[in-house]
Amino acid sequence: MGELLADHTTLRLGGPADRFLTHTDPAAWPDLAHTARSGDAAPFVLGGGSNTLANDTGYPGTVIRMATRGIAVRPLGDDLVEVIAQAGELLDSLVAFTVAEGLSGIEYLGGIPGTIGAAPVQNTGAYGQQISDTLTRLTVYDWGLSRTRELHPGDCDFGYRTSAFKTQPGRFTILEVGLHLTRRTCASPIRYQHLADVLAVRLGARPPLAEAAQAVLTDRRNRGLTLPTCGPDVRQAGSVFLNPPITHAQATAIRAAGGPAHSSTDGTLRASAGWLLEQAGFRPGIRVGPGVYCSRGRALTLTVRDNATAASFTAALEVLIHAVLITHRIRLRPEPVQPLRIGPAQRRHRRLG
C-alpha cells in the first residue's frame, strides 16, 4: 500500500497515493520533476494539507509534498524590500518573520494554515489583504512545457480566492514566491470593524505593526478561525465555503434581515457564507452527516470524527449547499480542493491566462 494521504491532510481523510514524493531541496527539483512526470497523470501537489479533501480511494498517480524551507530578504531602496520564500515555508511562519523584521504588507495574513506556495493558488486573503497585493514574481514548474518559468502577477489571473493555478489544475507547481514589502513600524489601515474592536481603534487607523499582527491572531482564535491542536474540532479544513457573490437586491434583503453583505477586493458584492448557513438552520456543533459536524465555534467549519469518510464529508457539503440554495436562492461553492487525475492530453489544452 502507498503513502496514505490521510497522514498528510488536516482532515485526516484519504486513501493511498500510487507514489508519494517529498520535495525538500530546491536544487534537486529537476530530478524530482523528472521522476514525478514519468507516469501518465499530472502530480498532485500538497503543502500543509489544510485545504485538501483527499478521496477515500486515494490518488492514482504521484503526489508531491512541498517541504522546502528558506526565506531571503533583498533591499530595494526607499524602505522597499523583496522577500523570497521557498514554497514549503508555512505562511504563518513567514508572516511572523516579516513582522519581526519590521516589514509590512502581509501582517493580516497571520494564523492562516498552509504554505506560502499554496497561498497564490486561491489568492489567500484576510482583513483586507490578499497575497496578490504584494506578490511580484513566482518561480513555477510548467508541466505543459516541461520547464521552470518565472511568472508575474499579470500572468496569474488573480481574483477573489482564485487564480490561474486554481482554474488550470495540474499545469503549474509553485516553487518560490517573491513579495515586495515595506519597512515601517505601523501596519496597513484597519478595514474590518471586529479587528478594530480588538485593538480598540477606529477604522482606518494604522496601529503598530506587531500589535496589529497579534490582534489578528487573537481575533482569529476568538472566532474559531484557527486550527485547534486538540479536542473534537481538531480534524478540519477551516472554512468550507467561499463567501458567495450576490446581487444588489439580495444584499438589500440580507441587510434587512440583519445579515452582512460587503464588497470584496474585486468589487463584487458578497454575502457571509457562515451567516447564510446559520440562517438555514445550521448551528455550531450540529451533526450534518455520518461523522461530520459543524465545529463548536461556527457553522462554516466542518469537523470530522472517527467514523467519517471523504464521501460522507462530500455528502455533508451537498446538504449545506442544498439548504442554503432552498433558503436563500444562493449557491455556495466549496473551498477544499479535491485531487483530480489530469493526464497529458488535458494539460496540452490548458493555456495560461
Image (cartoon, helix red, strand yellow):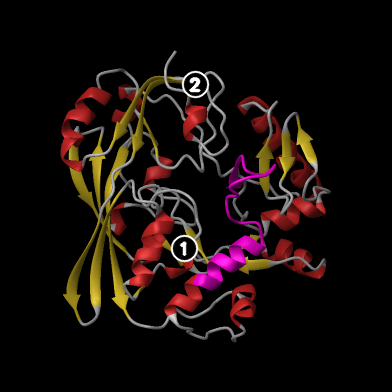
On the image, the x and y values in percent for residue 280 come to 81, 49
Instruction: Give the answer, above or below, for where 90 lies relative to 7.
Output: below
Q: Which residue is drawn at 37% across and 83% down?
A: 185
Front residue of this view, candidates 75 and 156: 75
The answer to whether residue 141 is above or below residue 213 is above
Give the residue drawn at x 36%, y 71%: 100
Residue 187 visible to the viewer:
no
Residue at image point 45% right, 83% down: 208
The residue labelled by disc 1 is 109
Q: Quadrant of the N terminus?
A: top left
Residue 199 falls in image quadrant: bottom right
Q: Earlier in the sequence, mark 1 or mark 2?
A: 2
Q: Is residue 25 left or right of residue 189?
A: left
Would residue 287 be found to the left or right of residue 14 on screen? right
Residue 51 is one of the magenta-drawn residues: no
Q: Label 1 neighbourhood size at 10 Å, few (<14), some (14-19), many (20+)?
A: many
Element type at mark 2: loop
Q: In this view, does 226 lie to the left or right of 142?
A: right
The type of residue carrying mark 1 is Leu
Name the residue at the front extreme.
230
| Disc 2: which residue | 58
What's under tag 2, amino acid-wise? Gly
Cα distance in 3D space between marks 1 and 2: 31 Å
14 in relation to 159, above or below? above
Q: Can residue 234 be seen in this view?
A: yes
Checking the image for residue 94, the label placed there is: none
Query: What range is drawn magenta here?
Result: 214-238
